[in-house]
Image: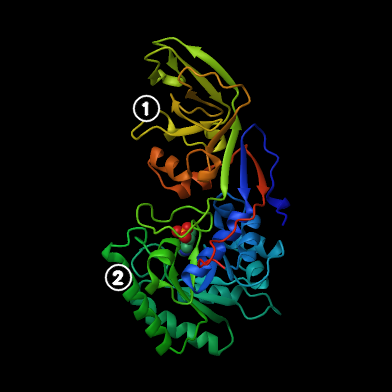
Amino acid sequence: MTATSDVRAGLGPGRIEVDLGALRHNARVLRATAGTRLIAVVKADGYGHGMLAAARAAKVGGADWLAAATVEEAVVLREAGLEGPILCWLTVPATDLAPAIAAGVDLTAYSAAELDAIAAATPSGAETPRVQLKVDTGLSRGGAPADAWSRLFAHAAEGERAGRWRITGIWSHFACSDEPGHPANDRQERAFRRALTLADEAGLRPELRHLANSAAAVLRPSARFDAVRCGIALYGLDPAPGHTSDIGLVPAMTVRAPLAMVKHLAPGDGVSYGHIWTADRATTVGLVPVGYGDGVPRHASSPGPAASAEVAVDGKRRPIRGRVCMDQFVVDLGGDLPAVGSDVVLFGPPSAGGPTAQDWAEACGTINYEIVTRIGGRMARTYLDSEIADAPGGEAR
Ligand SMILES: *Cc1c(COP(=O)(O)O)cnc(C)c1O
């Protein structure tokens, strides 16, 4: 399988390797675990993995639908030749909806006014626009508020009967699905069921009712409905650290750079801008030639508020010392002298021998989503294609 359009030459020594085999495997595992349709979420350049490559691999792995946030992303997917249903949900009044409607992309409407805008934007001769309705069940972000549901559903049903649009789905989104015990989850699911009842009473018969993102897809069987929308788990990262039962996901991204330089420090030598770290003993340090200009979080500077981020130099863990700069950072080599050019793994799957994106997230006070989505900048991006055997007799088939 090729992913040439997402390959990037890079403008520096950093390299992102994405394993398409891991993406396919994760799609298979998620589909089998959820036991319902899988909507593969490939927004934000596939969480940094390459949107088209991620979409193609997910489809080969069994994803039934693709989803993106913006209308523009969805149109790019279609124009790249991805067939089958594609959902998007982030429209603003200025968005030109015509290309998405012409491409048969499912748009999301939050209000009766948005439904009318979609009808008005439909190019003459285009097929009836496909629209999903998003209801706000407690996230208080996008979606129709509960007091508007009845009016929205009545308008949607009336327009559907008049052939102005087809309502293909009704959906909502959790606020706290990564905390399975949080009471908001039950409240939101109850509210979603109320919305579905109201929609049904209004005469709507959408093919797809969906509520769960990755964490809920894995941890909350009652929320799976007709489909689950999985992003982070598709990329092999834990959607609910500390809660998820291991379903055998494999992280798809590995980030590497070659060690650029090794030097000796004397006790008292300060390292990098601001000298926030000073050698307390004679040691050696190594220069890693990537920085926040490549998406390496400056919050990984050390000492910082949390445990320091680490990298693996030739397989050995080494802590970051001092501030992460725009183009480079320094690691403590503890007196060792690995060769210049040694392989430095910033993060990847456990099999890469280095830290994971989750480790970086914890060191930086953020979530694994942000680590993989923001990495990039000048880094090259390449694709590998491992064959990951699904567990014998396991669910992933
Ligand atoms: C990003 C997003 C998802 C995917 O969430 P994950 O936690 O990455 O699985 C699902 N639904 C909506 C509405 C989203 O914005």
Tag 2's secondary structure? helix
From where the camera sits, is residue 72 visible?
no
**Percent of width and height locating residue 146:** 34, 74
**Image height of 103 relative to 362, above or below:** below
What whole-number distance in Å separates the C-alpha atoms at marks 1 and 2? 40 Å
Q: Amino acid at mark 1?
A: Pro
233 or 143: nearer the viewer: 233
Instruction: Kindly identify the amino acid type of the residue bearing the numbered disc 2.
Output: Asp
Label located before the other in sequence (1 or 2):
2
Q: Are marks 1 and 2 in contact (CB under 8 Å)?
A: no
Please rate how many residues cluster around mark 2, counting C-alpha atoms within 10 Å: few if below 14, some from 14 to 19, many from 20: some
Image quadrant in which you'd find residue 184:
bottom left
Residue sitting nearer the eye, 204 or 122: 204
In the image, what residue occupies the spot 49% across and 66% down? 229
68 and 319: which is toward the camera: 319
> Residue at the spot x=43%, y=56% of the render?
239
Quadrant for the C terminus, please. Answer: bottom right
Per the image, the residue denoted by label 2 is 186
Q: Tell me the residue at 53%/15% (across/down).
A: 263
- The N terminus sits in image quarter: bottom right
> What residue does disc 1 label?
303
| Residue at the extreme front | 392
Q: Residue at x 63, y 68 (%)?
A: 100
The x, y position of residue 81, in whole percent, is 72, 65
Question: Would you place residue 131 above or below residue 245 in this image?
Answer: below
Splitting the image into 4 quarters, where does residue 131 fall? bottom right
Q: Is residue 106 left or right of residue 103?
A: left
Q: Residues within 10 Å of mark 1 (few under 14, many from 20)?
A: some
Query: Cβ(mark 1) to ligand 1 < 8 Å?
Result: no
The answer to which quarter of the image holds residue 95 is: bottom right
> SS of the residue at dot 1?
loop
Does the beta carbon at disc 2 come under 8 Å from ligand 1? no
